[in-house]
Image (cartoon, coloured by chain):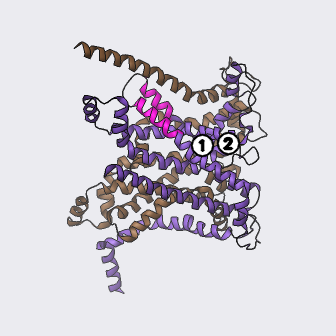
Chain colours: A brown, B purple
Amino acid sequence: MVDKKKKSKLKTRWNWLKSIIAIVISLFFFAPFYIILSLSFKSRADRTSYWLFPENPTFDAYAYALDKGDIWLAICNTLIVTVFSVVLVLVLGSIAAYPLARHKTRMNKLILSAFVGVMMVPPLSVLVPIYRELVMMGGINTFWGIILVTVTYSLPTSVFMFTNFIGGIPKELDEAALIDGCSQFMIFPRIILPNMAPVISSVLILTGVSIWNDYSFQLYVLQRPKLRTITLAISSFFSEGNTNMPAAAAATVISVLPLAIIYLCLQKYFVKGSMDSAVK
Amino acid sequence: MKNGNRSVMKFLQSDPRALSLLTLPAVLLFITFVAFPIVSGINISFTNWNGYSQEYSYVGFDNYRKMFTDPQVWTAFRNTLIYGFGSTLVQTILGLAFAMLLVNRFLFRGVARTIIYLPAMVAQLIIGYIWYFIVTYERGALNDIVALFGVDKVDWMSRGFRAVMIIMMINAIAYCGKTMIIFIAGLESIPNMYNEAASIDGANAWQVFRHITMPMLLPALTTSLVLNIIGGLKMFGLVVAMTNGGPGYASHSLSSLINSLYFGGQQAGYSAAVGMFSFIFIVLVSILLRRYLEMKEAQYNG
């Protein structure tokens, strides 16, 4: 009895220590975000240390960033590219995964391993030829150009995750549906799809975040200022000519905010998405 | 004709092979934007194309020969290894430590998990710009701290190798949250009775870690290693944001070097050759890595 009491006392103390360590780590990880936040509320003339929060916070930097940097336009462009790409990735990835998971023929195995191989391809190593190909197709500075390329390189992860998931749905369901007179092409929408909500949310989040954050493909395909996405717009604030650091910080905050808010609200699903992608 | 139609219908309705048609859109995209560019990239790599003009000529293996004596490529290659393997090492250590700390419930556990994972939501390029305010020479946040100790300001990114190490560390710190999540999932999957049994048998903390936790975490370790190494070897945005390859070419990764050869140097042929090199290298590393880790796992389980 005494021993148990001692143990639990030790445990509470250990938990307090853990809380303190957790706070210190959190402060460390939050510091970079704090610095751009506080800088974004400073005036241009304010030359105090980045660590100090401004005495008279202003929204000047935000006004400047939104006005001069076309941040709204960039957010709209990013939204267009992300939404269309994600929808295509979900549709094309899930319908491709169904036969790959159900009929392990030699050809299907080959297709699956080719897709998985694409995950290893560094975008930059093929960007020169892709750029050239898109020039020939008239796809430079078009949304369809960037969307098709983005979809292609986001598909492997989704095909992989969908195939794994469908593989875990009992095959007897398909067979029962076939016996009941369901045509084989209707099994996927009627039987499989209604069961896929958890994996769809994970793929949605994973590909959504990575497409929203993409830089390399967009840098090559979307060169006209009107078509700039967020990452491209932000980089113009950090080009060598610009000395308006609060505006650069404000633009950064605006670009990080949408995803950060969604993440804070739907944290559970983000974490689950990250875990799902790691399951082999 | 009618007969032919009927057999097509029959094929579609009942032959399971017909289902493979569903992979067609994905396969077409793959052929157009993966297979074709790789072939055409190999082709371009044997030319002296400058990236925009109509004319170019084949130069045989010149680009490849040049590559193996080019200090830019060797530096970028060395840096890519550091970004890939060095960053993975730090990420794994941090991720594992945070996971062990944050797996059981206590006050502020949720807050810490949320904040450590937060940077994983942010693009590499933007992570680079955020950290720019910390490591920059004039007014940099890190130099303010250094000044507190009475030391002179340091121009952190001015020396090549130091810049590489800083970029590597920033990448590891920013993205160790993902590794942490994978390890937490792994730790949660270890049945509690194993730990209890071990402590009844009188095992100390290190023994529990060494003989229960580590082996059970092996699958989590495998996946996080593969993800981090491949991700690190592809490093691009962070380098562009922090140094753009500088000073000189000292902090380039292979990806950022390809970009600067193409956009800055108008050497599309040469850039494609470096691209093919990095492509083959990364695919090779991934295959060997998977093989090796599968072998290790089999050893542990068998």
> Can residue B100 be seen in this snapshot?
yes
Kindly identify the amino acid type of the residue bearing the numbered disc 2: Ala
Taking the view exactly as shown, the residue that stands out farthest to the right is A241
In terms of image quadrants, where is residue A127? bottom right
Q: Closer to the camera, A274 or A197?
A: A274
Q: Residues within 10 Å of mark 2 (few under 14, many from 20)?
A: many
Question: Mark 1 falls within which chain?
Answer: B
**Which residue: 49% across, 60% down?**
A117
Q: Which residues are magenta?
A: B90-117
Residue at image coords 58%, 40%: B171
For the point 72% across and 42% down, which residue is it?
B160
Q: Are marks 2 and 1 on the same chain?
A: yes
Judge the density around disc 1: few (<14), some (14-19), many (≥20) Cα neighbours within 10 Å: many
**Which quarter of the rendered picture does the N terminus of chain B lie within?**
bottom left
Main secondary structure found in the magenta portion: helix
Q: Position of residue B280 (x, y in %)?
A: 58, 62
Mark 2, residue position: B241
Residue A108: image location, x then y, percent: 39, 67
Cβ atoms under marks 2 and 1 closer than 8 Å: yes
Query: Which picture quadrant has residue B243?
Result: top right
Q: Secondary structure at mark 2?
A: helix
